[in-house]
Image (tube, helix red, strand yellow):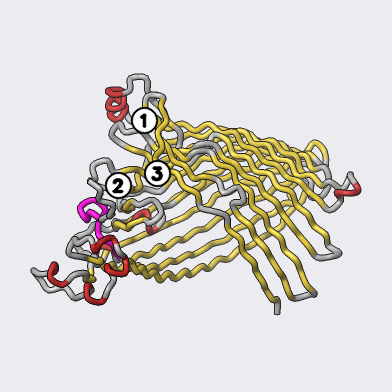
Amino acid sequence: SGDTIYTIDPAKQGVPARYWRFMNEKNYDVKIDFSLPYNLMKNGSKLRFGAKYLRKDRNFSERRFDINDDNSSYHGSVPEYLADDNVGMAVPGYPEEYGIYVSDATQISNTYDSYQNLFAAYLITDQQLTRKFRAAYGLRVEATHIFLQSANPSNPTGELQNIDFLPAINLTYKPKNNINLRVAYARTIARPSFRELAPYASFEFAGDYTLIGNENLKRTLIDNVDLRFELSLKPGELVSFDVFYKGFINPIERTFVTTASNDELTFENADRADVYGIEFEIRQNLDFIPALKNFKIGFNMALVTSIVNIPEDELNIIHATDPTAAAQRSMYGQAPYIINAYLNYSASKIKLNARLVYNTTGPKLAIVVRGGTPNVYDAPKNSIDFVLRKQIGQKIFLSFKAKNLLNTKFKKYYIYRDTKYIYSNYRLGRTFSFGLSFKL
């Protein structure tokens, strides 16, 4: 048609808007710890106990102002669009006669108050049973109350109230002074954040979707089992190998709302997730090479398998369009491999430290989609960061940071019938920063 002017369709994209968000949070944290040494079978042991109280109060509010117009093209000219003659005030029933105008589109539902009370107490004993065998075990009790209420009285409240018993045991066998064999079990907990619980819809500018909290979320219980071998070569050097298992009850996942007309994400609990893996780590000084005496390298790699069973009703929907689809999927946010490596340089004489860090992760589930629609995954990505720190005198410190030097693409994709489709694809760019600090 020869029309080269782009216009905004409010029915699809919405009108331009400006958001102001205000958050005020206060944290009160009090804790007390005791340590009592004692002898057991003529070996030094220790009894530790204590308590903690944590209080969080948060007030959040959002103001939104829409920029409306009369659907004129203004010949595609930004200066004409913003000209004084085209800017006016809204008159009820006749906004089109007043050109461009700003209206208050604030929703009371997007304001909420919340608090969290946490009481915790623990008792743990660390016993040196023999010269080579050590045991540490104990129990932590946590009582939590989280409450969240929208300024809109018709909105549901979010509330979480639990008393949890969290046991832990760590057994260490030391056949030689520089070798440790450890077996450990611990139950830990992960609670939903205020934002995850808040039943309020916020527009996420990075991603172009609406994020809605879920007031019905449950906390996540995690059972951790580790078997670890450690070899200490000399101070600052280590070789370790770890086999681990983590069992998640009610893990929290970011999910896509398929019934919404626009892109909406929320948070939901899966029933269970199981994670198995192995991890290898090495930290090594390079001082055995005279020219590299100021350098140190480190390497860490984890290979992980995570399993979440897809609910039967959802699996039936998936099999209706893709009969070969698996009955299990990976856990939200868990990559099958994670690799970290670094090179450190430290020269105490000139008070200079530098670090070059490399990181790569495998594909991981980014958005869980219900109703048989394919899930969205983060593609593997590589990153390199650099940090330099220089001390001048006794009180002045200079720093330089360079992040994302590879300018890696942040790509999301989904797979349907063995074919990969791009969901989003962008680069964040490289970041460089300088810092100056002064110690009093």
Q: Type of residue at label 3?
A: Glu
Cα–Cα gap, marks 2 and 3: 17 Å
Quarter of the picture holding the C terminus: bottom right
- Mark 1 and mark 2 lie on one chain; the one further toward the N terminus is 2
Q: Residue furthest top?
A: 324
Of residues 204 and 233, the one nearer the viewer is 204
- Mark 2 and mark 3 lie on one chain; the one further toward the N terminus is 3
Residue 192 image point, x, y percent: 40, 52
- Mark 1 and mark 3 lie on one chain; the one further toward the N terminus is 3
For mark 1, what is the residue? 310
Q: Type of residue at label 1?
A: Ile
Magenta extent: 8-17
Of residues 184 and 82, the one nearer the viewer is 82
Q: Quadrant of residue 355?
A: bottom right
Residue 266 image point, x, y percent: 33, 48
Cα–Cα gap, marks 1 and 3: 13 Å
For mark 3, what is the residue? 253
22 left or right of 296 in image: left
Q: Type of residue at label 2?
A: Asp
For mark 2, what is the residue? 263
